[in-house]
Amino acid sequence: MSAATNPQTKIMSAPVAAPRPVATPRPSASVFARALDLLSSVRFGVALLVLLAAACMVGMLIMQVNVEGFAKYYAELSPSQKLLYGSLGFFDIYHSWYFDAMLVVLSLNIVLSSIDRFPGAWTYVSRKKLDASAHWLRGQEQHAALSVEGGDAGEVAGRVSAACESLKLKARVTEKKGKTFVFGERGAWNRLGAYAVHVALLVIFAGGFLTAQ
């Protein structure tokens, strides 16, 4: 987004990105609220995915009880291996209680995190921030300011708009309170792509859980 002013035209720009909400600490959060925060945490979901991947790796390295040739494989194991693998449920890990529990908790994490973050993503797609103050632009992680000699705000805005379009950005020029703004973006709908992945994961988890019963 860019803002242009007269008489000496100044341009301030920042990448098209939704403002990051500042998390305010809650001094006396309840146990239930903390549990919800944990369940909707992206880091918690990633940790669960790593644990699920590790469990699947165990299932690939250790022959499962329903695979042909398991009896011969089991007979070749040492007594300590039989005891350890059997007590941990490694011979039928995909039907173990902890594998099902991880699937359920991860599914809950996906649902809660989607509910928590979807409104912000949808607002960014449906309600564009076509104007911004100089203070807001300076507060962005990436921003730049430059001065252009000569030309009015409309001419400079046209040049900025053309530069945006050369970068495959969809440019929109607006005016507000005597200031001209150029808003450029592309791939806005990509912000919703994660939710399609979430739905696909939930379908896969549901199918795996039902077929494992």
Image (spheres, rainbow, N blue to C red):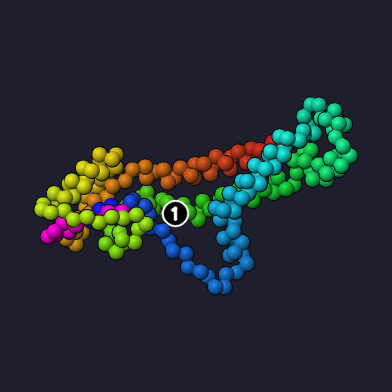
**Residue 65: x %, y % from top left:** 80, 34
Residue drawn at the location 66% of the way across and 46% of the way down? 51
Q: Is residue 175 visible?
A: no
Left or right of residue 25: residue 154: left
User: What predominant SS class does the magenta segment belong to?
Assistant: strand
Q: Which residue bears the numbered disc 1?
A: 119
**Residue 89 colored in magenta in the image:** no
Q: Residue furthest right?
A: 79
In magenta, the rendered stretch is 4-14
Q: Farthest residue toward the top?
A: 68
* Residue at image coords 24%, 47%: 172
Amino acid marked by disc 1: Pro
Dividing the picture into quarters, in which one does residue 100 lie?
top right
* Residue positioned 59% across, 56% down in the render: 39
| 10 or 89: nearer the viewer | 10
Considering the numbered disc 1 on the image, is that residue within a helix, a strand or a loop?
Answer: helix
Image location (x, y in percent) of residue 127? 34, 53
The quarter of the displayed image where residue 58 is located? top right
Q: Is residue 88 left or right of residue 123?
A: right
